[in-house]
Amino acid sequence: MASNLETLVTVFGGSGFLGRNVVRALCRRDYRVRVAVRRPELAGFLQPSGKVGQVHTVQANLRYPTSVEAAMRDSDVAINLVGILAESGAQSFDAVQAKGAETVAKAAAATGARMVHVSAIGADAESPSRYARAKAAGEAAVTAAVPSATIFRPSVMFGPEDQFTNRFAALARMSPVLPLIGGSTRMQPVYVGDVATAIADAVDGKAKAGATYELGGPEVLTMREIIEAILAIADRKPALIPLPFSLARFKANFLQFAPGAFKLTPDQVTLLARDNVVSDTAKAAGLTLEGLGISADSLEAIAPQYLWRFRAAGQFQRKSA
């Protein structure tokens, strides 16, 4: 039987939050991994993910097809993880998540490589969100170029280096008050390690070709419940002030230029108005983590392992009076 070391997997966006977890999962299964990123000189931290010579970084920018084609040379599998949460300059939703996905898919088709594409729950060509419309356009482009491609749509992901749980914990450490936007919006937070396992399973050939999977965690929670859970783990007690969507959009017009954890764009507010959970259709078809035989980890089980750093007493929680 052929060894996985004979299989070259090119991971576009391999240095990002999901990417580094995917690279580790592939290395554990002995695949050769080529990581295609815009700044390979900043991706050296991925080398210890595998054995000596198992991980190799190359330069590629999805806005430049020739660089993508070069990164795909001799590859057996292409994984596209590239996505952005906010636009900046030439890095627009359309350029990265629609046209960029198409560029990777066409390069994979030209090479004869299999493809795994990561989109997002909520991808919808009719959505009022430009992010969601671009995700839907990317899915359509990938399917057109590589009909056998497997597409994964995760819900909001959490993990040690996320921009979700860490963001709210950081804000709670800095402010006695937190605005609550979309408090009743339902989400299904999914552990990034479980998503990475699903992607590695697809590379193994365990996922259905040409299928779209929706990946969510074991619990459906409202936005309020998620933030309350984060605050409890971080041992912080700011007041949660519900913010109407109209006021949140107005504030986002200014906060979209803010740095770090304070950044909030009007499009992100639009996304918060819609539930982000696995559909009944995906459940019925077995196109879920459970359908792949993966037992999903909960926010409560994983988040305390890294959010403790936001506690005033470090790894220890303050004792109640």
Image (spheres, rainbow, N blue to C red):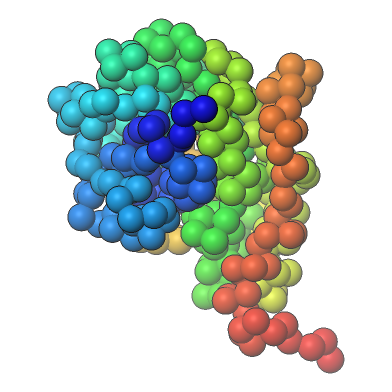
Residue 126: image location, x then y, percent: 52, 16
Residue at image location 41% in from the left, 8% down from the top = 144
The answer to whether residue 132 shows anywhere in this view is no
Residue at image location 30% in from the left, 50% down from the top = 53
Q: How many marks?
A: 0
Q: Is residue 144 left or right of residue 210?
A: left
Q: Can you name the residue that lies furthest to the right here?
A: 321
Residue at image location 28% in from the left, 58% down from the top = 44
Q: Is residue 223 above or below residue 150?
A: below
Q: Is residue 289 above or below residue 20?
A: above
The answer to whether residue 107 shows anywhere in this view is yes
User: Is 217 in front, or is 88?
Assistant: 217
User: Is 272 in front, or is 68?
Assistant: 68
Residue 80 found in image quarter: top left
Residue 317: image location, x then y, percent: 72, 83
Residue at image location 47% in from the left, 28% down from the top = 2
User: Is 55 in front, or is 218?
Assistant: 55
Q: Is residue 62 left or right of residue 222?
A: left
Residue 181: image location, x then y, percent: 61, 49
